[in-house]
Amino acid sequence: ENNINDINPLCFGDLKMAREIGAKQAVQTNIDKLMESIVEKKSESRFIWLAASTHEGEEEVIGKVHKILERKLKLHASDLKSKYSSVLTIIAPRHPERSNDIIRFLERDLMLSCDLHSNLFNAGNLINEKAVAELLDEKQVLIVDSLGELVSIYKYVDVAFIGASL
């Protein structure tokens, strides 16, 4: 009998192939290092949610949800029961080539401050600590502009939305 607490999401590897890998075989990727850096540097009060494999048109809804979450958090900021004081939305479009269009829309039409996850790395794929600090201080939305990163991101977010499910 399987216990839900015994399931390790890292053991699924590539979700499209659903091949099982042992946790010891999992290699720490650059996105793992980036997400660890974000989680380590953020205060526990930042709510991080992921919109994964989004399709065209869903980002507008996701942006509006981000704004609603921010408004609700501001309303309850003084509430001692409120665990979070800010929101970071991570969007991983199903087709990463749409990333720049998504940023243009979110910044122009919804006035959200965005960045590409690829901008958070220096040459040699080292984490750009200054860019990560700027993300945490000033950015509201992070767009994942490459494929194969989702498995590493899921374990660091509070909530995940899966695209094409609206």
Image (tube, rainbow, N blue to C red):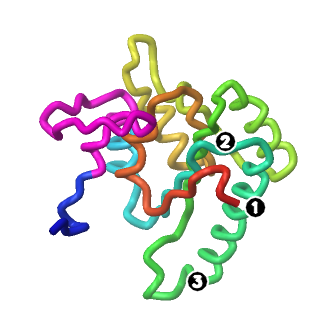
- Name the residue furthest left: 24
Q: Which amino acid type is shown beneath numbered disc 3?
A: His
| Mark 3, residue position | 76
Q: Residues within 10 Å of mark 2 (few under 14, many from 20)?
A: many
Question: Residue 12 at what x, y percent from top left?
Answer: 31, 42
Which of the pair 6/74 is nearer the observer?
A: 6
Whether residue 81 is in magenta: the answer is no
Q: Is residue 19 left or right of residue 97?
A: left
Q: Which amino acid type is shown beneath numbered disc 2?
A: Cys
Task: Tell me which numbered mark, 2 or 3, is placed earlier along the sequence.
Answer: 3
Range of magenta residues: 9-33
Residue positioned 32% across, 49% down in the render: 40
Question: Residue 72 at what x, y percent from top left?
Answer: 65, 77
| Mark 1, residue position | 64
Q: Residues within 10 Å of mark 1 (few under 14, many from 20)?
A: some
Labels 1, 3: front one = 1
Q: Vertical placement of 51 versus 146: above or below?
A: below
Q: Vertical placement of 49 versus 1: above or below?
A: above
Q: Is residue 26 left or right of residue 166?
A: left
Image quadrant in which you'd find residue 70: bottom right
Q: Which amino acid type is shown beneath numbered disc 1?
A: Lys
The secondary element bearing badge 2 is classed as strand
| Mark 2, residue position | 114
The secondary element bearing badge 3 is classed as loop
Q: Is residue 20 left or right of residue 155?
A: left
Task: Tell me which numbered mark, 1 or 2, is placed earlier along the sequence.
Answer: 1
Q: Residues within 10 Å of mark 3 (few under 14, many from 20)?
A: some
Task: Tell me which numbered mark, 1 or 3, is placed earlier along the sequence.
Answer: 1
Q: Is residue 158 left or right of residue 142?
A: left
- In whole angstroms, how far apart are the C-alphas of marks 1 and 3? 19 Å
Question: Residue 150 at what x, y percent from top left?
Answer: 45, 40
